[in-house]
Image: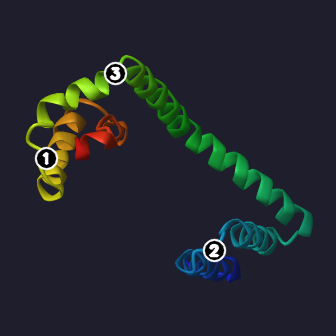
Amino acid sequence: MVLTIPHWIYLIGTCLIILTMLFRQNVVVPAVLMTFLVGWLYTGSFFLGLQTIFQASLTAAGELFNIFLIIAIMTALLHSLKAIRSDERMITPFQKVMVNGHISFWVLVFVTYAISLFFWPTPAVSLVPKTTIYK
């Protein structure tokens, strides 16, 4: 396979986005500009290059929608657990062991690990209330 100019521009765009993230800046503008540039050079048409920006956004939305949906459902379930205070009830037995910061840290590590075995790991972290550390 021969690498063409759009391939090299894509590589430069990827490096530019990584560099932008390293400087803790917003990556939207470089990503949109490089998407446009790659689309323009690949198709040879300025207007198809503009269209590439919107097609890329739709493709990304289509691929990520399932993940957003799962996160939204898990967040709703987490809030329902908090409403009935089950997050506090799950941690209550471990509060007696948490006597200082170091022990609390390790207790939280093991409790979070145990909870994540039964729940999806991301919401499991939120199930451990922050107030339990210093009680």
Q: Are marks 3 and 1 in contact (CB under 8 Å)?
A: no
Residue 134 vertical placement versus 75 (above, below): below
Q: Quadrant of residue 77?
A: top left
Q: Earlier in the sequence, mark 1 or mark 2?
A: 2
Alpha carbons under labels 2 and 3: distance apart = 39 Å
Q: Quadrant of the N terminus?
A: bottom right
| Element on which disc 1 rests | helix
Cβ atoms under marks 2 and 3 closer than 8 Å: no
Q: CA distance from mark 3 to mark 1?
A: 20 Å
CB atoms at circles 1 and 2 under 8 Å apart? Answer: no
Disc 2 marks which residue? Answer: 25
Residue for badge 3: 85
Amino acid under label 1?
Answer: Val
Q: Give the Cα separation between the discs numbered 1 and 2.
A: 36 Å
Question: Which numbered disc flags the more N-terminal residue, 2 or 3?
Answer: 2
Q: Nearer the viewer, residue 29 or 77?
A: 77
Residue drawn at (37%, 22%) of the image: 81
Labels 3 and 1: the sequence-earlier one: 3
Q: Indicate the position of residue 114 as horizontal and vertical percent values.
A: 16, 37
Quickly name the residue at label 1: 107
